[in-house]
Amino acid sequence: MSYLMNSSEILQTIQMIDQQHLDVRTVTMGISLLDCAASSAASCAEKVYEKICRKAENLVSESRSIEQEYGIPIVNKRVSVTPISLVAASCDDKDYAPIAKAMDRAAKTVGIDFIGGFSALAQKGFTESDLCLVRSIPGSLAETHLVCSSVNVGSTRAGINMDAVALMGKVIRETAELDPMGCAKLVVFCNAVEDNPFMAGAFHGVGEPECVINVGVSGPGVVAHALKSCKGEKIDVVAETIKRTAFKITRMGQLVAQEASRRLHVPFGVVDLSLAPTPAIGDSVAEILELIGLERCGTHGTTAALALLNDAVKKGGVMASSHVGGLSGAFIPVSEDAGMIRAAEEGALSIDKLEAMTCVCSVGLDMIAVPGDTSAETLSAIIADEAAIGMINNKTTAVRLIPAIGKTVGERIDFGGLLGSAPVMPLHSGSASAFIERGGRIPAPLHSLKN
């Protein structure tokens, strides 16, 4: 599929890039590491390092070449790999930190921004390798800079592995105590997808090709700019405006994806339509919701406005790309969105409202700072709530929580760069310990029986 753009579209795109924060958020190369299995973590790590360096050696240079030739900013160049719990299953060692360090070293060698896939899929139960990986997460994230980790604890077809939920609360707590930044690189999923190009949850699924290029586009600022011309118009006009804008954004992503695929001699996978905000003023999903008609993101009506936005983005984007996948919707990370930060600081946006919003948006409770003394059981309970939303609604949901060690409600934790900063948000005081300590598995819902 190829696209011809007329002069008007070209000028519009230039304006979007120059004034409205339009960019390609990431070009992510997925790499299968299934052939890197070995009997020791050291041998496996050596194979992992060699293959990543070999496959991704030209990813950054070719992405920069596309940026220069087309004038399209590509903010991140990333790699995702096969979940390491699968790759390392034949290792005799119980600590997978050497493999994480090899991933980190490879990422630095090829010059990418992040590498994802220090991951496990445990929606129905743990293998020995899954447990080894999960227990290796805190130390591995503390000792690396670019490695991202994820664990899938539930799915619509399998139910929710409450043993995994309980363990991940402890892992998040331990990770925060070693290095709070590690929690920003750790996601707990329900219904994780195999072709997600966005960190920290990207991994290369076992159903994917040997190597693939996935592109994540963005453009909250472009959507916000378009909506400024809709003041006083009916909701139908708002939806149509978002849809048309998403189409333009996705066409650019398709162009970059095809060009990267051609230059790197790697199959094109998907364009992910997700609106991914940044801390920059004017690049905010919260601002879009407020332009739709809310005084402040988080007030009554926010969930409905977000549902409208998410649906219109998908309808507009799906017609502009030959393959749409990943998560594709609107992200609502608190620390990475200036409007969300403002709403949380003013008390308009609570964790309960964010949870309701995740029913209709792309992922889940994302980049939320919680008090430093939050218990592991409370963290697990939040994960369980979000996984239940994903399981029942047959959608991907996720949790990325950051216990702000030594801080309390109202204080702020800073991450820098695209990760931004987050106000510490209040949680409910009641305990869910007895619920979490039960363990076992929440059965899959009736509508999982589709065969």
Image (spheres, helix red, strand yellow):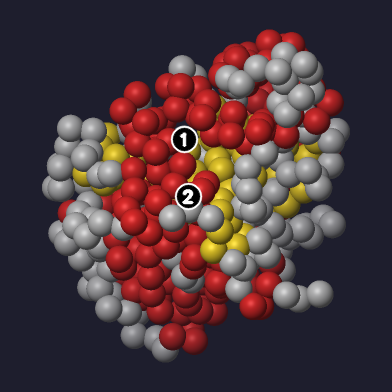
Residue 23 x, y percent position in the rendering: 54, 46
**Label 2 with label 1: CB-CB less than 8 Å:** no
Q: What's the amino acid at mark 1?
A: Lys
What amino acid type is highlighted by mark number 2? Val
User: Where is residue 243, by image quadrant?
Assistant: bottom right
Q: Residues within 10 Å of mark 1 (few under 14, many from 20)?
A: many
Q: Is residue 333 above or below residue 74?
A: below
Residue name at image x 63 percent, y 48 percent: 125
> What residue did someone put label 2 on?
165
The residue sitting at 66% across, 33% down in the picture is: 128
How far apart are labels 2 and 1 at the CA level? Answer: 17 Å
Disc 2, SS: helix
In the rendered view, would you say 98 is above or below 25? above
State the residue in front, 422 or 7. 422
User: Of the numbered discs in the image, which one, if any, rests on residue 185?
Assistant: 1
- Mark before the other along the chain sequence, 2 or 1: 2
Mark 2 surroundings: few (<14), some (14-19) or many (≥20) residues within 10 A: many
Task: List x then y, in percent, for residue 199.
Answer: 54, 41
Up-down: is 372 above or below 247? above
Q: Nearer the viewer, residue 412 or 238?
A: 412
Q: Position of residue 176 (x, y in %)?
A: 34, 32
| Residue at x-position 64% and y-position 53% | 124
Residue at horizontal 63 percent and vertical 42 percent from the top: 126
Nearest the viewer among 138 and 209 is: 138
Q: Position of residue 167 (x, y in %)?
A: 46, 42
Quadrant, the N terminus: bottom right
**Can you tell which mark lies on residue 288?**
none
Determine if residue 27 is in view.
Answer: no
Residue 164 seen from this side: yes
In depth, the one of 275 and 433 nearer the eye is: 433
Q: Secondary structure at mark 1?
A: loop
